Amino acid sequence: MGDLLLVRHGETEWSRSGRHTSWTDLPLTQHGEEQAKSLAPLLTDRTYALALASPLGRAIRTAELAGLTGVVPDPDLHEWDYGGYEGITTVDIHRARPEWDLWTDGVPPGPESHGESPEQIGARADRVLARLAPALADGDVILVAHAHVLRVLTARRLGLPPAEGRLFQLATGTVSRLSTEHGRPAIAEWNRRP
């Protein structure tokens, strides 16, 4: 069985400032582009049975700059739909809702999108895992996407509820690797940078 490599896209203006970014398709900052390029030595010496990415530009651009080829956009790798909290920081949300927690409460609808609960993003992660399972039997699989969706996907791969993605902090421009130990999924590397 192959390993599952998770790549979080490089920095954007909103990831740097802590603003929730799902549907707003911001480009990488100059630093984000440098982060993506720096990942190439960690990624290009491998052969991938499958390479998937979020359809958003920041993920696709990260994959390109990291030297990945044959990457297929997968809509289920889109970031958590932040609904009415798109573009807002957690600090600002807590001013109106001090007890709010993304991992248990999800987000309310917004003018452009419906918002998403932990269970809904968990269902998307489960669909991705089901689609890539045959490819993992043939070798390594790589996913290029966003922090929260990759954290939820990690929780689901490890057999945890979607909300347990809260346990896996994920920095921009990093590679993480899920492998197996004694036949069970396990974290082999996390937040690796060159």
Image: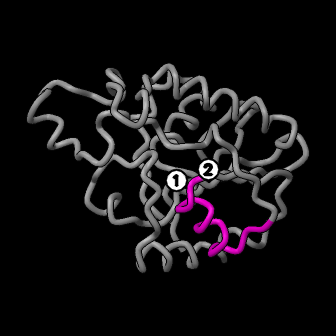
Q: Position of residue 162 (x, y in %)?
A: 49, 25
Q: Residue furthest right?
A: 138
Query: Mark 1 sits on what residue?
Result: 190
Above or below, comparing residue 15 to residue 141 in the picture: below
Q: Nearer the viewer, mark 1 or mark 2?
A: 2
> Tag 1: residue type?
Trp
Magenta residue check for 64? yes
User: On screen, 72 above or below 156?
Assistant: below
Query: Which residue occupies 78% across, 34% down?
Result: 131
Q: Main secondary structure of the magenta part?
A: helix
Labelled pair 1, 2 in contact (Cβ < 8 Å): no
Mark 2: amino acid: Ser
Q: Position of residue 62 (x, y in %)?
A: 58, 67
Please give left or right for residue 22 compared with residue 41 in the image: left
Quadrant location of residue 136? top right
- Structural crowding at the residue carrying mark 2, measured as other residues with C-alpha within 10 Å and reported as few (<14), some (14–19) or many (≥20): many
**Place of residue 93 in the rendered image (x, y in percent of width and height, measured from the top left):** 18, 36
Mark 1 packing: few (<14 Cα in 10 Å), some, or many (20+)?
some
Q: Nearer the viewer, residue 82 or 166?
A: 82
**x 62%, y 62%: residue:** 60
Q: In the image shown, does 178 or 27 lie closer to the viewer? A: 27
Instruction: Read off the residue under disc 2.
Output: 54
155 falls in the magenta region: no
Mark found first going from the N terminus, 1 or 2: 2
Instruction: Give the magenta-colored segment's residue range.
Output: 56-69
Residue 119 x, y percent position in the rendering:
49, 19
Image point (45%, 41%), residue name: 148
